[in-house]
Structures are given as C-alpha cells and as structure tokens.
Image: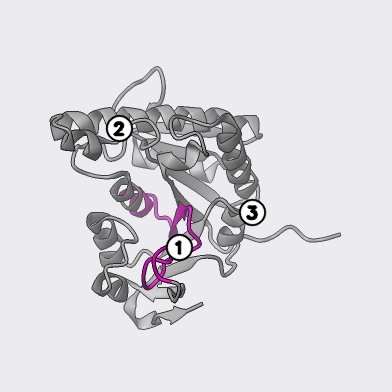
Amino acid sequence: MTAAPRPAYKRVLLKLSGEALMGNQGYGISPETIRTIATEVAETAKLGVELAVVVGGGNIFRGLTESSKGMDRASADYVGMLATVMNAVSLQDAIERAGVTTRVQSAIPMSQLAEPYIRRRAMRHLEKGRVVIFGAGTGNPFFTTDTAAALRAMEIGAEILLKATKVDGVYDKDPRKHADARRYAQVTFTDALKQDLGVMDATAFALCRDNELPMNVFDMTKPGNIQRVVCGEDVGTRIVKDNEGSRFA
C-alpha cells in the first residue's frame, strides 16, 4: 500500500487569479473548472497542511482596466473587491462539496456572506483544519490581490506563498516570443527585480522580499500540481532570498 504524501509545509497561502476560474469561456466562473480546482484544494488540505486561499476577481471585473476607460480608480477597485467575494463564496461551495470545511473572510464587512477578516480567528480556523478563503483583497483601493496575498500570508504566519498561474514557472524572457527562453528552477528576489521578471506586482514582491517570505510560481492547469508543490516537489519556480542563489531548471 502506497503511503500518503507528506506535506513539506505546515501552513501555506495559495494565490488564485480570478481568470483561473473561468476556464476557456472568457468570462465568469466555469463550473467544471472551479470544481476541478476545489477538488485539488480539498485533497491538499486533507494531507494535513493548513491552507489559506486568496482569490482574485479578474474573471468578473478588473478595476485597473475599467479605470483606464474613465471610471474613478477607487470606485473601480471597490467593484473589483466585490468580484473577489463572489469568487470566494463560489469556491467555498465547491470545496465543501469536495468534503472540506471552509470559511470565507472578507476585508469589507458583509455579514450575510462572510466573516469579517480577523487575523486570530483566521489562524484558529486553520488550526482546526478549515480552508480559509480571503475575499475583498486588502479592503483598500489601489492594492492588488497579489498584495493582499503577500499581506495575508505574513499575517497568518504562512511558510510559503504559492502563486498558481497558467505557465510552468518564471522564465528569463518571454517563452512565447523567445524560443531560447530558460525556466528558472530557483531565482532570488534581487535577480527577479533586476531582470524585471514580472512575478507579481511591485508592492507584493517587495513585501515578500523584505520579510523573506519564499514564493513558488507553478502551473495550476496540470492536475495534482498544488499537492506536489505543498509536498515539496520541484515544480515551477521558487523565489528565494539572495543567499540561496539562482539556478535554471
């Protein structure tokens, strides 16, 4: 009988983009896609890792895009925050259908849908084995959900920030434009900044660098990758502090 995989981390934060939930339909939430993601999240949580999630809202509304069309930036960002709560509640339903208890905490109070964000309560939920989904970003305009993910990860004492994307890691140049692009197995914060690799927005990246919070960027479209990363397998690209060095895959 094969032994169950063992998580390499006690507590992690997973950042999911809103676009990840829409599958191939171009807008909104794909029931099949969210069910697949929720199943992977649930199976990972069942390994015993304490798992928190920050979800974006770009599949429904992008504040920065709308502000560029003339909408007031603060107003656009608030609407974007509401979109993240819609995604969080949808993800909650799907994860619980997969057999894992969850809690949604919102940075904007909306008591009929979610708990308010309270750091100590979130940590207590994690200790009890519940998946905690953070909605509404930081609750403030002008900050992205990447920044919310970095902030929440540090607040709850996560050991690593996992960024789920549609590419298999961080490259030294755009692999869609350059056939000779090489994927990093590991890259330091300083090298990523110098080369402008675009791992996350600058504020989020600076928070992780200054607080030495490692990151792992990986392809979430490959089944089982969330569990593999949590179990310490060499998947995607790790972003680490400078003394650990950079190396290609």
Q: Quadrant of residue 111?
A: top left
Specify the amino acid type for callout 3.
Answer: Gly
Circle 3 residue: 224
Viewport quadrant of the N terminus: bottom right
Disc 1 or 3, which lies upstream in sequence? 1
> Is 136 covered by the magenta stretch?
no
Numbered tag placed on residue 216 in the rendering: 1
Residue depicted at 61% across the width and 60% down the height: 228
* Nearer-the-camera pick, 218 or 113: 218
The range drawn in magenta is: 151-178
Q: Quadrant of residue 61?
A: top left
> Is 163 covered by the magenta stretch?
yes
Specify the amino acid type for callout 2.
Answer: Met
| Residue occupying the far top of the picture | 112
Circle 2 residue: 81
Cα distance in 3D space between marks 2 and 3: 29 Å
In the rendered image, the vertical position of residue 247 relative to residue 98, given as above or below: below
Disc 1 or 2, which lies upstream in sequence? 2
Cα distance in 3D space between marks 1 and 2: 25 Å
